[in-house]
Image: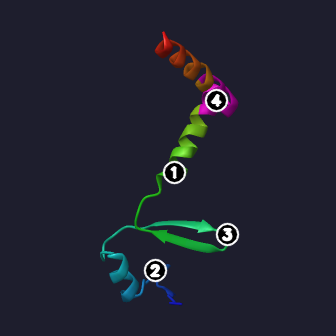
Amino acid sequence: MTQARIWGRGQVTIPARLRRELRLDSEQDLEVFRVGKSLVLTPKKLLGDTLARQVEKEMKKEGLTLENLLSDLRKERARYRQEKNV
């Protein structure tokens, strides 16, 4: 296991070996998120959580539930199948 130390104003130095293995540049931004009592750093922006929050916000704004969306999807699928079979 590799250790890192917090220094200065909360800065963390990622060990050189890990930076090389992950091809991290010295000025690269990282996404940081908490999982329980752990911190996870990733060089890739994770869109799933952001997208889920935006969809949830819009659904609340429109008064929609997941069940509403699934019901509409089933209706559209049935209509599509009916049109294709004609």
Find the magenta span and give its range: 59-72
Q: How far apart are marks 3 and 1 (CA)?
A: 19 Å
Q: Residue furthest top?
A: 86
**Observer-nearest of 72 and 79:** 79
Please name which of the two marks, 3 or 2, marks the residue nearer to the observer.
3
The residue where tag 2 is placed is 11
Q: In which quarter of the image is the N terminus?
A: bottom right
Mark 3 highlights which residue? 36
Density class for disc 2 (Cα within 10 Å; few <14, some 14-19, many ≥20) is few
Disc number lying in front (3 or 1): 1
Q: Do the residues labelled 2 and 1 touch (CB within 8 Å)?
A: no
Expressed as whole percent of the image width and height from the top left, the position of residue 19 reads 36, 81
Of pointers 2 and 1, the one earlier in the residue sequence: 2
- Quote the CA–CA distance across marks 2 and 4: 45 Å
**Residue receiving disc 1:** 48
Residue type at tag 1: Gly
Q: How far, Cα to Cα, is label 4 from label 1?
A: 20 Å
Name the kind of residue labelled 4 in the image.
Answer: Leu
Residue 68 drawn in magenta? yes
* Residue type highlighted by circle 3: Gly
Instruction: Give the vertical position of 2 relative to 67 (above or below).
Output: below
Q: Which of marks 2 and 4 is in front?
A: 4
Query: Per the image, is 19 magenta?
Result: no
